[in-house]
C-alpha cells in the first residue's frame, strides 16, 4: 500500500520572481517568461542531490507542466523531459499548479512512459482527488501519450502542431 500525500501545490509569483514549492519553501526564480500559451521558469535547485537546475513550462490548455531537469553527475536519468499532469490556475502575476499524480517520462524520438498510475488511483480511492479529477488526469495523460506517439515522440513537433513553441536555455 502507498502512503499517500495530498496533491502537491506550487505557487509561481511572476511579479515577485519567486516559486513556492509544495513544502512551502520560497525559491528565487532566475527567469520567468509569460507567453499566450503558458509560463516559463528557470531556477537553480539548491539542496537537491539529483539535479542542480530546472526549466519548466506550465501549459494550462494542456494541463501539463513540462520540465527539463539538469541532473548532477551520477544521478542522470534516461529521460529528456518530464511531464506532470497538473491543474493550472493562471493569474495576472501569480499562477498556481496542483499536481494530479500522473507523470510522463519522455525519451525523445524513442518512447513515452506513463508513471504513477498507482498513486492516482490511491488518491482517488482515499478521497484526495475526486473521481472526476482522476478521470481528467487520465484523459490528459493519454491525450499527450497519443499525440507524442503520432509525432515520433518529438515534443517540439507535437507542440508546433498546436501553435506552441517552447524555448529552453540548453536545448
Image (tube, helix red, strand yellow):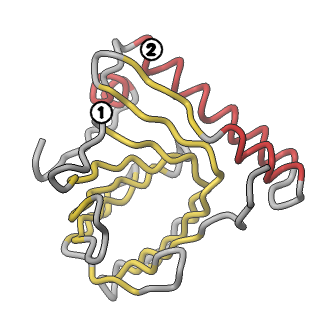
Location of residue 117 (image quadrant): top right
Residue sitting at x 32%, y 63%? 34
The C terminus appears in which quarter of the rendering?
top left
Residue 164: x and y in percent read 33, 37
Dot 1 alpha-carbon crowd within 10 angstroms: few under 14, some 14 to 19, many 20 or more: few
Viewer-proximal residue, 135 or 88?
Answer: 135
Location of residue 78 (image quadrant): top left
Horizontal side of 24 relative to 75 (left or right) equals right
Horizontal side of 101 relative to 69 (left or right) equals right
Judging from the image, what secondary structure is the residue with disc 1 in?
loop
- The residue identified by callout 1 is 78
Residue sitting at x 26%, y 59%? 51
Judging from the image, what secondary structure is the residue with disc 2 in?
helix
Structural distance between the alpha carbons of marks 2 and 1: 18 Å
Residue 39: x and y in percent read 36, 60
Single out the residue that lies furthest toward the left: 170
Residue sitting at x 62%, y 35%? 140
Residue 12: x and y in percent read 43, 74
- Specify the label residue 149 is tagged with: 2
Vertical arrangement, residue 36 with respect to residue 112, above or below: below
Vertical arrangement, residue 80 with respect to residue 55, above or below: above
Amino acid at each position: 500500500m502507498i502512503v499517500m500525500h495530498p496533491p502537491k501545490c506550487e505557487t509561481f509569483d511572476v511579479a515577485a520572481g519567486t516559486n513556492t514549492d509544495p513544502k512551502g519553501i520560497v525559491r528565487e526564480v532566475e527567469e520567468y517568461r509569460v507567453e499566450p500559451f503558458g509560463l516559463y521558469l528557470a531556477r537553480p535547485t539548491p539542496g537537491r542531490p539529483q539535479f542542480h537546475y530546472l526549466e519548466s513550462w506550465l501549459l494550462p490548455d494542456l494541463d501539463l507542466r513540462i520540465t527539463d531537469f539538469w541532473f548532477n553527475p551520477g544521478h542522470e536519468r534516461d529521460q529528456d523531459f518530464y511531464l506532470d499532469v497538473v491543474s493550472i490556475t493562471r493569474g495576472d502575476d501569480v499562477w498556481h499548479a496542483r499536481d494530479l499524480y500522473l507523470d510522463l517520462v519522455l525519451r525523445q524520438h524513442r518512447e513515452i512512459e506513463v508513471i504513477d498510475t498507482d498513486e492516482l488511483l490511491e488518491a482517488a480511492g482515499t478521497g484526495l482527488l475526486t473521481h472526476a479529477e482522476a478521470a481528467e488526469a487520465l484523459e490528459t495523460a493519454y491525450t499527450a501519450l497519443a499525440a507524442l506517439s503520432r509525432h515520433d515522440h518529438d515534443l517540439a513537433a507535437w507542440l508546433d502542431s498546436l501553435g506552441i513553441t517552447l524555448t529552453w536555455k540548453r536545448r
